[in-house]
Image: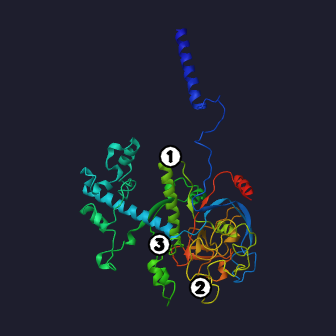
């Protein structure tokens, strides 16, 4: 009997040793604390079209005379962390990529829903409309996890089709001469304005159909309220994302601007010009899509995801606009608006009624004039730019001195910076504050995005010293 107990004890001890090896030292490194092994050391990659703005401390606000005497930007010392910023304002071409993606997504959704409702996915004919069915229409190739989600989550909420994957492997055919069948023609027809509203013999896309849906989590609000119920802070947004091209007419009474209304956004002649007619909420939606677009690519390639693209805070914008020049009036220093060759340094309204003397009547290409010392173009003039911050005349008194951001979700006034092609020089100053309502679009307001730098910020300082 004692022998049996001994064997049992040895067996249990052996199991215990084996368990310790599994749980305590999975890499077999003699029980040392080695940390979770990653696929490789993280190196922050500069996103295409962006420049790195290194962390630093600066004086935000009016260090010079406030000519307008608004007293809404008292000088204050603040610090910001490192971030990437678009070297130019988001262009028409870049925003059209977003619009085209949404248009494609809407069409694919319409096709997939039509196929599902008509039972066309079961005909086995991949040459017809059935090729656009939801990816889970055929469950034979689904993983066990996908089957579980399909059976337990999809089709039970307010949106019966939420969560189901679209088929992006098949191209959308837009040429009416190549429509696949009558079903396809019926679905595509729903994307256009009726023939009675056609102009010059061409039917136009119904831009009201171009809606982008996304979900965001208000982390800051949840943290402050110690929210345990995550769903209370998850917000679903659905909004129309096509630019309001009528701003070119509505912003100016008794002024002939129809050519800009007709051509500015969609024509290739203006592809590299800054997009306008975008309100604050649409700019936020673009940031969400840009993040999703990049992360979807990284996920397909089994790479680690990036953090979000977003609008800059007001402090980040001013810090970047100064380009490392402390106390400067303009991004290039100051106080002069004309260089040694007699050329203007930005696109604005230099004289009463004279918009063209600086080389442009309206906007100019986003990469025009000289960049500031951080490599950023048109941080003054061309178009004013949305920031993430809410406007309050006293916000500088309230905000933190570390990564300040006066964001109030109930405040509909959002800060714009930099001045535009129709503004006088005062609004081009890096410390001048202005605002617009978040649901308003203008012919002189655009935006650019930023992304937080992740990793060792001292590496940036070493890199800058090496370059210099």
- Give the quadrant of the C terminus: bottom right
Distance, label 3 to label 1, CA atoms, is 35 Å
**Separation of residues labelled 3 and 2 (CA atoms):** 22 Å
**Helix, strand or loop status at disc 1:** loop
Crowd tier of the residue under label 2, counting other residues whose Cα lies within 10 Å: few below 14, some 14–19, many 20 or above: some
Residue 356 is tagged as: 2
Return the disc, 3 or 1, that comes first in the chain's sequence: 3
The residue identified by callout 1 is: 302
SS of the residue at dot 3?
A: helix
- One can see residue 234 in this view: no
- Residue 231 lies left or right of residue 384; in this view the side is left
Residue that badge 3 annotates: 268
Q: Residue at x 49, y 53 (%)?
A: 297
The earlier-in-sequence mark between 3 and 2 is 3
Who's the residue at 55% across and 20% down the image?
12
As helix, strand or loop, the secondary structure at mark 2 comes to loop
Q: Nearer the viewer, residue 365 or 237?
A: 365
């Amino acid at each position: 009997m004692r022998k049996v107990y001994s064997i049992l004890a040895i067996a249990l001890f052996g199991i215990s040793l084996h368990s310790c090896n599994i749980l305590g030292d999975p890499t077999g490194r003699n029980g040392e604390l080695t940390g979770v092994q990653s696929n490789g050391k993280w190196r922050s990659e500069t996103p295409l079209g962006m420049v790195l703005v290194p962390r630093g401390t600066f004086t935000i606000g009016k260090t010079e005379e406030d000519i307008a005497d608004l007293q809404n930007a008292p000088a204050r010392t603040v610090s910001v962390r490192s971030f990437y910023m678009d070297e130019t304002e988001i262009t028409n071409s870049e925003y059209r990529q977003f619009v085209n993606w949404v248009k494609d997504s809407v069409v694919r959704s319409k096709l997939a829903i039509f196929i599902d409702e008509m039972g066309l996915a079961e005909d086995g004919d991949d040459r017809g409309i059935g090729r656009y069915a939801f990816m889970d229409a055929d469950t034979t190739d689904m993983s066990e996890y996908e089957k579980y989600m399909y059976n337990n989550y999809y089709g039970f909420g307010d949106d019966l089709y939420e969560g189901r994957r679209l088929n992006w492997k098949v191209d959308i055919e837009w040429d009416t001469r190549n429509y696949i069948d009558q079903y396809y023609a019926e679905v595509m027809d729903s994307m256009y304005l009726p023939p009675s509203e056609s102009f010059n013999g061409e039917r136009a896309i119904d831009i009201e159909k171009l809606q982008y849906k996304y979900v965001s989590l208000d982390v800051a609000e949840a943290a402050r309220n110690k929210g345990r119920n995550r769903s209370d802070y998850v917000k679903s947004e659905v909004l129309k994302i096509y630019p309001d091209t009528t701003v070119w007419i509505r912003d100016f009474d008794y002024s002939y601007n129809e050519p800009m209304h007709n051509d500015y956004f969609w024509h290739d002649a203006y592809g590299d010009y800054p997009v306008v007619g975008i309100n604050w909420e649409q700019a936020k939606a673009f940031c969400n899509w840009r993040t999703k677009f990049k992360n979807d690519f990284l996920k397909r390639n089994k790479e680690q995801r990036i953090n979000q693209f977003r609008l800059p805070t007001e402090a980040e914008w001013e810090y970047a606009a100064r380009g490392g020049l402390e106390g400067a009036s303009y991004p290039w220093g100051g106080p002069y608006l004309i260089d040694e060759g007699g050329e203007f340094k930005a696109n604005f309204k230099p004289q009463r009624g004279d918009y063209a003397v600086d080389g442009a009547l309206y906007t100019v290409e986003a990469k025009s004039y000289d960049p500031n010392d951080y490599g950023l173009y048109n941080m003054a003039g061309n178009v004013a730019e949305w920031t993430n911050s809410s406007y309050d005349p006293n916000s500088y008194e309230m905000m933190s001195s570390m990564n300040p951001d006066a964001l109030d979700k109930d405040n509909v006034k959002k800060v714009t910076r930099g001045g535009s092609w129709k503004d006088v020089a005062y609004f081009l100053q890096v410390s001048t504050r202005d605002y617009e309502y978040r649901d308003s679009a203008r012919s002189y307001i655009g935006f650019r995005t930023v992304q937080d730098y992740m990793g060792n910020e001292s590496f940036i300082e070493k890199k800058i010293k090496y370059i210099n």
